[in-house]
Amino acid sequence: MYLKKLNVKKFSLSIFLLIILIATIVFGCQNSSEQVDKSYFDSAETIERLSLDTGVLTIWWDKGFIEEEKTFFQKIVNDWEKQQNKKVQLVFFDENQLVEQIEAAVAAGNPPDLTIDRTQLALLYAWEDKLVDVSSTIAPVADFISDSALENAQLFNQVEQKKSYYAVPLYQEAVYLHYWRDWLEELGYSPQDIPQDWDGFWEFWTQLQERLRSEQQQEIFSLGFPSSPYSTETFFLFEYILEAYNVQVVDEAGQLVIEQQENRQGLVEALKWWSELYQEGYIPPSALVWRNEDNNSSFYNRIMAITANPSLSIPAARFHEKDLYLNKLATIEFPRKPDGQPMRYLIEVRQALIFKDSPNQKDAKSFLSYLIEPTVLDSYIEAADGRFFPVNTSGWNDPFWTNADDPHITEVKKIMTQSPTRPYSFSTNPGYVEALEENVWGEALYGILVEGISPEKAAKNAIAQFQEFFADWQ
Protein backbone atom coordinates (compact mmCIF):
# COMPACT_ATOMS: atom_id res chain seq x y z
CA MET A 1 0.00 0.00 0.00
CA TYR A 2 1.07 3.55 -0.71
CA LEU A 3 0.79 4.91 2.84
CA LYS A 4 2.78 3.25 5.59
CA LYS A 5 0.44 1.35 7.90
CA LEU A 6 0.59 1.62 11.63
CA ASN A 7 2.26 -1.45 13.11
CA VAL A 8 1.96 -2.77 16.64
CA LYS A 9 5.32 -1.33 17.66
CA LYS A 10 4.17 2.20 16.86
CA PHE A 11 0.51 2.00 17.77
CA SER A 12 0.52 3.11 21.40
CA LEU A 13 2.85 6.04 20.81
CA SER A 14 0.83 7.11 17.78
CA ILE A 15 -2.36 7.23 19.84
CA PHE A 16 -0.61 9.46 22.38
CA LEU A 17 0.76 11.75 19.68
CA LEU A 18 -2.59 11.85 17.93
CA ILE A 19 -3.96 13.50 21.06
CA ILE A 20 -1.33 16.19 20.61
CA LEU A 21 -2.24 16.49 16.96
CA ILE A 22 -5.94 16.88 17.68
CA ALA A 23 -5.22 19.49 20.32
CA THR A 24 -3.11 21.57 17.97
CA ILE A 25 -5.14 21.38 14.77
CA VAL A 26 -8.71 20.52 15.75
CA PHE A 27 -9.92 23.99 14.77
CA GLY A 28 -7.87 23.89 11.60
CA CYS A 29 -9.22 20.57 10.35
CA GLN A 30 -12.14 22.30 8.74
CA ASN A 31 -9.63 24.08 6.50
CA SER A 32 -8.02 20.89 5.24
CA SER A 33 -8.78 20.49 1.56
CA GLU A 34 -7.94 16.79 1.43
CA GLN A 35 -11.04 15.26 3.05
CA VAL A 36 -12.39 11.88 1.94
CA ASP A 37 -15.41 12.36 -0.31
CA LYS A 38 -17.40 9.20 0.39
CA SER A 39 -19.69 9.67 -2.60
CA TYR A 40 -16.70 9.44 -4.94
CA PHE A 41 -15.11 6.65 -2.95
CA ASP A 42 -18.24 4.51 -2.88
CA SER A 43 -18.98 5.05 -6.55
CA ALA A 44 -15.46 4.03 -7.46
CA GLU A 45 -15.79 0.80 -5.52
CA THR A 46 -18.86 -0.18 -7.50
CA ILE A 47 -17.39 0.43 -10.95
CA GLU A 48 -17.09 -2.85 -12.80
CA ARG A 49 -15.12 -1.62 -15.77
CA LEU A 50 -17.98 -0.05 -17.66
CA SER A 51 -15.57 0.35 -20.53
CA LEU A 52 -15.47 -3.42 -21.07
CA ASP A 53 -19.21 -3.64 -21.57
CA THR A 54 -20.30 -0.30 -22.95
CA GLY A 55 -17.33 1.43 -24.52
CA VAL A 56 -17.41 4.11 -21.83
CA LEU A 57 -13.96 5.58 -21.15
CA THR A 58 -13.11 5.16 -17.46
CA ILE A 59 -10.96 7.89 -15.88
CA TRP A 60 -9.78 7.93 -12.27
CA TRP A 61 -8.42 11.33 -11.27
CA ASP A 62 -7.09 13.35 -8.36
CA LYS A 63 -9.81 15.69 -7.10
CA GLY A 64 -7.17 18.17 -5.91
CA PHE A 65 -7.23 20.62 -3.04
CA ILE A 66 -9.32 23.31 -4.73
CA GLU A 67 -12.91 22.94 -5.88
CA GLU A 68 -12.25 24.93 -9.06
CA GLU A 69 -9.57 22.42 -10.05
CA LYS A 70 -12.02 19.53 -9.95
CA THR A 71 -14.80 21.52 -11.60
CA PHE A 72 -12.59 22.60 -14.49
CA PHE A 73 -11.39 19.06 -15.14
CA GLN A 74 -15.01 17.94 -15.26
CA LYS A 75 -15.59 20.68 -17.85
CA ILE A 76 -12.67 19.37 -19.94
CA VAL A 77 -14.19 15.90 -19.86
CA ASN A 78 -17.62 17.24 -20.81
CA ASP A 79 -16.19 19.24 -23.70
CA TRP A 80 -14.33 16.21 -25.04
CA GLU A 81 -17.46 14.06 -24.76
CA LYS A 82 -19.42 16.55 -26.87
CA GLN A 83 -16.61 16.98 -29.37
CA GLN A 84 -16.10 13.24 -29.88
CA ASN A 85 -19.65 12.03 -29.15
CA LYS A 86 -18.24 9.70 -26.49
CA LYS A 87 -19.07 8.86 -22.89
CA VAL A 88 -16.74 9.04 -19.89
CA GLN A 89 -17.05 7.53 -16.42
CA LEU A 90 -15.05 10.05 -14.35
CA VAL A 91 -14.27 9.18 -10.73
CA PHE A 92 -12.43 11.53 -8.38
CA PHE A 93 -10.37 10.35 -5.42
CA ASP A 94 -8.35 12.23 -2.91
CA GLU A 95 -4.62 11.96 -3.55
CA ASN A 96 -3.83 9.11 -1.16
CA GLN A 97 -6.88 7.04 -2.04
CA LEU A 98 -6.18 7.33 -5.75
CA VAL A 99 -2.81 5.64 -5.46
CA GLU A 100 -4.15 2.93 -3.17
CA GLN A 101 -7.08 2.22 -5.49
CA ILE A 102 -4.88 2.16 -8.59
CA GLU A 103 -2.48 -0.28 -6.95
CA ALA A 104 -5.38 -2.52 -5.90
CA ALA A 105 -7.04 -2.34 -9.33
CA VAL A 106 -3.83 -3.16 -11.20
CA ALA A 107 -3.13 -6.07 -8.84
CA ALA A 108 -6.63 -7.38 -9.53
CA GLY A 109 -6.19 -6.97 -13.29
CA ASN A 110 -9.01 -4.42 -13.39
CA PRO A 111 -7.53 -0.92 -13.76
CA PRO A 112 -9.32 2.09 -15.26
CA ASP A 113 -8.49 3.11 -18.81
CA LEU A 114 -6.74 6.30 -17.78
CA THR A 115 -5.39 7.92 -14.61
CA ILE A 116 -2.98 10.53 -13.28
CA ASP A 117 0.21 9.60 -11.45
CA ARG A 118 2.20 11.60 -8.94
CA THR A 119 4.30 8.99 -7.17
CA GLN A 120 6.17 7.45 -10.10
CA LEU A 121 3.93 4.40 -10.27
CA ALA A 122 4.53 4.94 -13.98
CA LEU A 123 8.08 3.72 -13.48
CA LEU A 124 6.90 0.45 -11.93
CA TYR A 125 4.11 -0.22 -14.40
CA ALA A 126 6.23 0.65 -17.44
CA TRP A 127 8.89 -1.76 -16.17
CA GLU A 128 6.25 -4.49 -15.90
CA ASP A 129 4.80 -3.76 -19.37
CA LYS A 130 1.44 -2.61 -17.99
CA LEU A 131 1.29 0.77 -19.74
CA VAL A 132 0.58 1.87 -23.29
CA ASP A 133 3.36 3.54 -25.29
CA VAL A 134 2.12 7.14 -25.74
CA SER A 135 4.91 8.44 -27.99
CA SER A 136 2.41 9.29 -30.73
CA THR A 137 0.35 11.35 -28.28
CA ILE A 138 3.34 13.36 -27.07
CA ALA A 139 4.93 13.90 -30.51
CA PRO A 140 2.73 16.85 -31.68
CA VAL A 141 3.57 18.92 -28.57
CA ALA A 142 7.03 17.57 -27.72
CA ASP A 143 8.77 20.74 -28.89
CA PHE A 144 6.89 22.75 -26.25
CA ILE A 145 7.51 20.41 -23.29
CA SER A 146 10.51 21.04 -21.07
CA ASP A 147 13.43 18.64 -21.44
CA SER A 148 13.21 17.50 -17.80
CA ALA A 149 9.51 16.63 -18.17
CA LEU A 150 10.18 14.63 -21.34
CA GLU A 151 13.06 12.84 -19.64
CA ASN A 152 10.78 11.97 -16.75
CA ALA A 153 8.21 10.39 -19.09
CA GLN A 154 10.72 8.20 -20.94
CA LEU A 155 10.67 4.93 -19.05
CA PHE A 156 12.17 1.46 -19.37
CA ASN A 157 10.06 -1.58 -20.26
CA GLN A 158 11.84 -4.62 -18.84
CA VAL A 159 9.62 -7.07 -20.72
CA GLU A 160 10.18 -5.55 -24.15
CA GLN A 161 13.70 -4.37 -23.27
CA LYS A 162 13.14 -0.86 -24.57
CA LYS A 163 12.84 2.70 -23.34
CA SER A 164 9.97 4.83 -24.60
CA TYR A 165 7.27 7.29 -23.55
CA TYR A 166 4.85 5.49 -21.25
CA ALA A 167 3.45 8.61 -19.56
CA VAL A 168 2.17 11.98 -20.76
CA PRO A 169 3.60 14.89 -18.71
CA LEU A 170 0.94 17.36 -17.58
CA TYR A 171 2.44 19.72 -15.01
CA GLN A 172 5.25 19.92 -12.51
CA GLU A 173 5.94 20.98 -8.95
CA ALA A 174 8.73 21.49 -6.44
CA VAL A 175 8.93 21.92 -2.67
CA TYR A 176 8.31 25.55 -1.74
CA LEU A 177 8.77 27.38 1.55
CA HIS A 178 5.91 29.50 2.94
CA TYR A 179 5.93 31.77 5.99
CA TRP A 180 3.74 34.26 7.83
CA ARG A 181 4.96 37.60 6.55
CA ASP A 182 2.69 39.61 8.84
CA TRP A 183 4.34 38.05 11.91
CA LEU A 184 7.76 39.12 10.68
CA GLU A 185 6.56 42.65 10.07
CA GLU A 186 5.07 42.82 13.57
CA LEU A 187 8.52 41.99 14.93
CA GLY A 188 10.11 44.72 12.80
CA TYR A 189 11.55 42.53 10.02
CA SER A 190 11.17 42.65 6.26
CA PRO A 191 11.76 39.81 3.78
CA GLN A 192 15.14 41.38 2.97
CA ASP A 193 16.27 40.71 6.56
CA ILE A 194 16.09 36.92 6.08
CA PRO A 195 19.62 35.55 5.56
CA GLN A 196 20.25 33.42 2.48
CA ASP A 197 23.13 31.28 3.77
CA TRP A 198 22.14 27.86 5.09
CA ASP A 199 22.92 28.24 8.80
CA GLY A 200 21.86 31.88 8.97
CA PHE A 201 18.52 31.16 7.29
CA TRP A 202 17.42 28.43 9.70
CA GLU A 203 18.83 30.21 12.76
CA PHE A 204 16.77 33.26 11.82
CA TRP A 205 13.58 31.22 12.21
CA THR A 206 14.58 29.33 15.35
CA GLN A 207 15.57 32.56 17.07
CA LEU A 208 12.14 34.04 16.39
CA GLN A 209 10.28 31.29 18.23
CA GLU A 210 10.28 32.76 21.73
CA ARG A 211 9.56 36.27 20.46
CA LEU A 212 6.61 35.02 18.45
CA ARG A 213 5.23 33.09 21.41
CA SER A 214 5.47 36.18 23.57
CA GLU A 215 4.03 38.48 20.93
CA GLN A 216 1.16 36.21 19.83
CA GLN A 217 0.41 34.76 23.28
CA GLN A 218 0.21 31.21 21.95
CA GLU A 219 2.44 28.19 21.42
CA ILE A 220 4.19 28.69 18.10
CA PHE A 221 6.93 26.59 16.55
CA SER A 222 9.55 27.88 14.16
CA LEU A 223 9.49 25.09 11.60
CA GLY A 224 6.63 23.08 10.09
CA PHE A 225 8.71 20.06 9.08
CA PRO A 226 6.57 16.92 8.59
CA SER A 227 8.57 14.28 10.49
CA SER A 228 6.24 11.33 10.21
CA PRO A 229 6.61 7.94 8.52
CA TYR A 230 2.94 8.34 7.51
CA SER A 231 3.45 11.45 5.33
CA THR A 232 5.14 11.37 1.95
CA GLU A 233 5.94 15.04 2.51
CA THR A 234 8.56 13.90 5.03
CA PHE A 235 10.22 11.94 2.24
CA PHE A 236 10.04 14.80 -0.28
CA LEU A 237 11.45 17.42 2.09
CA PHE A 238 14.22 15.12 3.31
CA GLU A 239 15.26 14.62 -0.30
CA TYR A 240 15.89 18.37 -0.39
CA ILE A 241 18.02 18.19 2.75
CA LEU A 242 20.06 15.42 1.13
CA GLU A 243 20.48 17.64 -1.93
CA ALA A 244 21.63 20.48 0.33
CA TYR A 245 24.32 18.19 1.78
CA ASN A 246 25.24 16.96 -1.73
CA VAL A 247 24.30 13.37 -0.88
CA GLN A 248 23.91 11.03 -3.85
CA VAL A 249 21.57 8.12 -3.28
CA VAL A 250 21.87 6.92 -6.89
CA ASP A 251 24.20 7.81 -9.74
CA GLU A 252 23.10 9.12 -13.15
CA ALA A 253 22.42 5.56 -14.32
CA GLY A 254 20.06 4.97 -11.38
CA GLN A 255 22.47 2.65 -9.56
CA LEU A 256 22.66 2.78 -5.78
CA VAL A 257 25.66 4.69 -4.37
CA ILE A 258 24.34 5.76 -0.95
CA GLU A 259 26.58 3.16 0.74
CA GLN A 260 29.73 4.99 -0.42
CA GLN A 261 31.50 6.63 2.52
CA GLU A 262 31.00 10.27 1.49
CA ASN A 263 27.29 9.74 0.82
CA ARG A 264 26.80 7.66 3.97
CA GLN A 265 28.37 10.42 6.08
CA GLY A 266 26.24 13.06 4.37
CA LEU A 267 23.13 11.04 5.18
CA VAL A 268 24.17 10.89 8.84
CA GLU A 269 24.70 14.66 8.91
CA ALA A 270 21.30 15.32 7.31
CA LEU A 271 19.53 13.05 9.82
CA LYS A 272 21.38 14.70 12.69
CA TRP A 273 20.53 18.21 11.47
CA TRP A 274 16.80 17.47 11.19
CA SER A 275 16.50 15.43 14.40
CA GLU A 276 18.28 18.08 16.47
CA LEU A 277 15.81 20.72 15.32
CA TYR A 278 12.99 18.48 16.52
CA GLN A 279 14.68 17.57 19.79
CA GLU A 280 15.37 21.23 20.55
CA GLY A 281 11.65 22.00 20.25
CA TYR A 282 11.51 23.92 16.99
CA ILE A 283 9.21 21.44 15.22
CA PRO A 284 5.69 20.66 16.56
CA PRO A 285 5.55 17.34 18.49
CA SER A 286 2.47 16.40 16.44
CA ALA A 287 4.64 16.41 13.29
CA LEU A 288 5.60 12.84 14.25
CA VAL A 289 2.13 11.65 13.24
CA TRP A 290 1.21 14.08 10.49
CA ARG A 291 -0.26 12.81 7.28
CA ASN A 292 -0.04 14.83 4.08
CA GLU A 293 -2.94 17.19 4.79
CA ASP A 294 -1.89 17.96 8.39
CA ASN A 295 1.02 20.14 7.38
CA ASN A 296 -1.35 22.48 5.52
CA SER A 297 -4.00 22.62 8.22
CA SER A 298 -1.44 23.16 11.00
CA PHE A 299 0.08 26.03 9.06
CA TYR A 300 -3.32 27.61 8.42
CA ASN A 301 -3.96 27.27 12.15
CA ARG A 302 -0.81 29.38 12.62
CA ILE A 303 1.11 27.10 14.94
CA MET A 304 4.38 27.49 13.01
CA ALA A 305 6.20 30.36 11.36
CA ILE A 306 7.52 28.67 8.21
CA THR A 307 6.72 25.41 6.48
CA ALA A 308 7.54 23.45 3.33
CA ASN A 309 5.05 21.96 0.89
CA PRO A 310 5.52 19.97 -2.35
CA SER A 311 3.21 22.19 -4.43
CA LEU A 312 1.79 25.71 -4.25
CA SER A 313 -1.38 24.43 -2.59
CA ILE A 314 -0.92 26.34 0.69
CA PRO A 315 -1.31 29.83 -0.83
CA ALA A 316 -3.48 28.57 -3.71
CA ALA A 317 -6.15 27.30 -1.33
CA ARG A 318 -6.40 30.83 0.10
CA PHE A 319 -6.30 32.60 -3.26
CA HIS A 320 -9.70 34.24 -2.76
CA GLU A 321 -8.84 35.57 0.72
CA LYS A 322 -6.99 38.48 -0.80
CA ASP A 323 -5.58 40.12 2.31
CA LEU A 324 -4.22 36.83 3.60
CA TYR A 325 -2.98 35.74 0.18
CA LEU A 326 -1.29 38.99 -0.79
CA ASN A 327 -0.19 40.48 2.52
CA LYS A 328 0.07 37.84 5.24
CA LEU A 329 1.40 34.78 3.42
CA ALA A 330 4.75 34.74 1.61
CA THR A 331 6.65 32.25 -0.53
CA ILE A 332 10.44 32.19 -0.38
CA GLU A 333 13.33 30.35 -2.01
CA PHE A 334 15.47 27.82 -0.17
CA PRO A 335 18.72 29.25 1.16
CA ARG A 336 22.05 28.42 -0.40
CA LYS A 337 23.49 25.02 0.43
CA PRO A 338 25.96 24.66 3.33
CA ASP A 339 28.79 24.78 0.76
CA GLY A 340 27.49 28.12 -0.58
CA GLN A 341 26.11 26.76 -3.87
CA PRO A 342 22.52 27.59 -4.89
CA MET A 343 19.93 25.01 -3.95
CA ARG A 344 19.05 22.66 -6.78
CA TYR A 345 15.28 22.12 -6.86
CA LEU A 346 13.91 18.60 -7.19
CA ILE A 347 11.09 18.49 -9.72
CA GLU A 348 8.16 16.11 -9.66
CA VAL A 349 6.12 15.72 -12.83
CA ARG A 350 2.50 14.66 -12.71
CA GLN A 351 1.71 12.42 -15.65
CA ALA A 352 -1.22 10.68 -17.29
CA LEU A 353 -1.12 6.91 -17.82
CA ILE A 354 -3.07 4.59 -20.12
CA PHE A 355 -3.17 0.99 -18.96
CA LYS A 356 -2.39 -1.79 -21.39
CA ASP A 357 -5.47 -3.69 -20.23
CA SER A 358 -7.66 -0.83 -21.44
CA PRO A 359 -10.07 -1.79 -24.23
CA ASN A 360 -10.39 1.92 -25.05
CA GLN A 361 -6.83 2.86 -25.85
CA LYS A 362 -7.79 4.87 -28.92
CA ASP A 363 -10.28 6.97 -26.96
CA ALA A 364 -7.86 7.36 -24.07
CA LYS A 365 -5.20 8.72 -26.44
CA SER A 366 -7.76 11.00 -28.04
CA PHE A 367 -8.73 12.44 -24.67
CA LEU A 368 -5.10 13.00 -23.67
CA SER A 369 -4.37 14.68 -26.99
CA TYR A 370 -7.20 17.10 -26.23
CA LEU A 371 -6.12 17.61 -22.60
CA ILE A 372 -2.54 18.53 -23.50
CA GLU A 373 -3.49 21.12 -26.09
CA PRO A 374 -1.72 24.21 -24.68
CA THR A 375 -4.86 26.32 -24.33
CA VAL A 376 -6.74 23.52 -22.56
CA LEU A 377 -3.96 22.43 -20.20
CA ASP A 378 -2.87 25.97 -19.36
CA SER A 379 -6.44 26.89 -18.47
CA TYR A 380 -6.70 23.82 -16.23
CA ILE A 381 -3.53 24.76 -14.35
CA GLU A 382 -4.71 28.34 -13.94
CA ALA A 383 -8.08 27.10 -12.64
CA ALA A 384 -6.11 25.47 -9.82
CA ASP A 385 -4.74 28.93 -8.98
CA GLY A 386 -1.24 27.94 -10.05
CA ARG A 387 -0.89 25.02 -7.66
CA PHE A 388 1.31 23.47 -10.35
CA PHE A 389 3.71 24.88 -12.93
CA PRO A 390 3.28 24.15 -16.66
CA VAL A 391 5.55 21.62 -18.37
CA ASN A 392 4.81 23.26 -21.73
CA THR A 393 7.24 26.17 -22.02
CA SER A 394 4.82 28.10 -24.23
CA GLY A 395 2.65 28.71 -21.16
CA TRP A 396 5.40 30.25 -19.07
CA ASN A 397 4.80 33.70 -20.56
CA ASP A 398 1.02 33.70 -20.23
CA PRO A 399 -0.37 36.69 -18.31
CA PHE A 400 -1.16 34.40 -15.38
CA TRP A 401 2.55 33.60 -14.89
CA THR A 402 3.79 37.12 -15.59
CA ASN A 403 1.52 38.84 -13.07
CA ALA A 404 3.98 40.87 -10.99
CA ASP A 405 1.23 41.66 -8.46
CA ASP A 406 1.01 38.03 -7.35
CA PRO A 407 3.94 37.39 -4.97
CA HIS A 408 3.55 33.59 -4.92
CA ILE A 409 3.26 33.09 -8.68
CA THR A 410 6.20 35.45 -9.25
CA GLU A 411 8.39 33.52 -6.82
CA VAL A 412 7.45 30.12 -8.22
CA LYS A 413 8.10 31.16 -11.80
CA LYS A 414 11.51 32.50 -10.75
CA ILE A 415 12.32 29.21 -9.00
CA MET A 416 11.14 26.98 -11.84
CA THR A 417 12.77 28.93 -14.67
CA GLN A 418 15.95 30.35 -13.11
CA SER A 419 17.10 27.93 -10.41
CA PRO A 420 19.07 24.71 -11.00
CA THR A 421 16.68 21.74 -11.14
CA ARG A 422 16.71 17.95 -11.48
CA PRO A 423 14.10 15.18 -11.31
CA TYR A 424 13.64 13.32 -8.02
CA SER A 425 15.88 10.28 -7.88
CA PHE A 426 12.88 7.97 -7.50
CA SER A 427 12.17 8.62 -11.18
CA THR A 428 15.28 6.59 -12.11
CA ASN A 429 14.78 3.15 -10.54
CA PRO A 430 11.75 1.13 -9.38
CA GLY A 431 13.64 0.29 -6.18
CA TYR A 432 13.59 3.97 -5.26
CA VAL A 433 9.81 4.03 -5.71
CA GLU A 434 9.56 1.22 -3.16
CA ALA A 435 11.68 3.31 -0.80
CA LEU A 436 9.20 6.16 -1.27
CA GLU A 437 6.21 3.89 -0.65
CA GLU A 438 7.82 2.56 2.53
CA ASN A 439 8.86 6.12 3.46
CA VAL A 440 12.40 5.07 4.36
CA TRP A 441 13.43 8.61 5.37
CA GLY A 442 10.39 8.97 7.61
CA GLU A 443 11.23 5.64 9.21
CA ALA A 444 14.81 6.76 9.80
CA LEU A 445 13.69 9.95 11.53
CA TYR A 446 11.14 8.00 13.55
CA GLY A 447 13.87 5.65 14.72
CA ILE A 448 15.93 8.57 16.03
CA LEU A 449 13.13 10.66 17.52
CA VAL A 450 10.98 7.91 19.02
CA GLU A 451 13.05 4.76 19.38
CA GLY A 452 16.18 6.62 20.44
CA ILE A 453 18.63 5.11 17.98
CA SER A 454 21.61 7.14 16.77
CA PRO A 455 21.72 8.92 13.39
CA GLU A 456 24.47 6.50 12.42
CA LYS A 457 22.26 3.50 13.17
CA ALA A 458 19.28 5.10 11.42
CA ALA A 459 21.43 5.72 8.34
CA LYS A 460 22.66 2.12 8.38
CA ASN A 461 19.08 0.83 8.56
CA ALA A 462 17.95 3.10 5.73
CA ILE A 463 20.82 2.02 3.48
CA ALA A 464 19.98 -1.62 4.15
CA GLN A 465 16.37 -0.99 3.12
CA PHE A 466 17.47 0.69 -0.10
CA GLN A 467 19.76 -2.21 -0.90
CA GLU A 468 16.93 -4.67 -0.35
CA PHE A 469 14.52 -2.73 -2.58
CA PHE A 470 17.05 -2.26 -5.37
CA ALA A 471 17.92 -5.97 -5.29
CA ASP A 472 14.27 -6.72 -6.09
CA TRP A 473 14.57 -4.91 -9.42
CA GLN A 474 17.87 -6.22 -10.74
Image: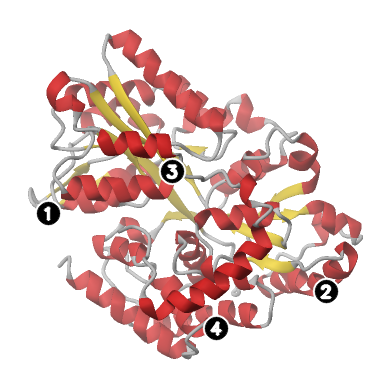
Circles 3, 1 touching at the beta carbon (< 8 Å)? no
Report how far apart the C-alphas of labels 1 and 2 lie in the structure.
55 Å
Give the mark, 1 or 2, whose residue is nearer the N terminus: 1
Q: How many marks?
A: 4
Give the mark, 3 or 4, whose residue is nearer the N terminus: 3
Q: Which mark is residue 210?
A: 2
Q: Position of residue 390 (x, y in %)?
A: 49, 35
Report how far apart the C-alphas of labels 3 and 4 lie in the structure.
34 Å
Give the residue pinned by disc 1.
158
Residue pictured at 39% horizontal, 16% vertical: 78
Badge 2 element: helix
Please name whichever residue, 123 or 12, is drawn nearer the observer in this view of the structure. 12
Give the residue pinned by disc 4.
272
Q: Amino acid at mark 4?
A: Lys
Q: Position of residue 409 (x, y in %)?
A: 64, 39
Please name whichever residue, 47 or 429, is drawn nearer the observer in this view of the structure. 47
Give the mark, 2 or 3, whose residue is nearer the N terminus: 3
Give the residue pinned by disc 3.
94
Quadrant of the image occupied by residue 83: top left
Q: Amino acid at mark 2?
A: Glu
Camera-side mark, 2 or 4: 2
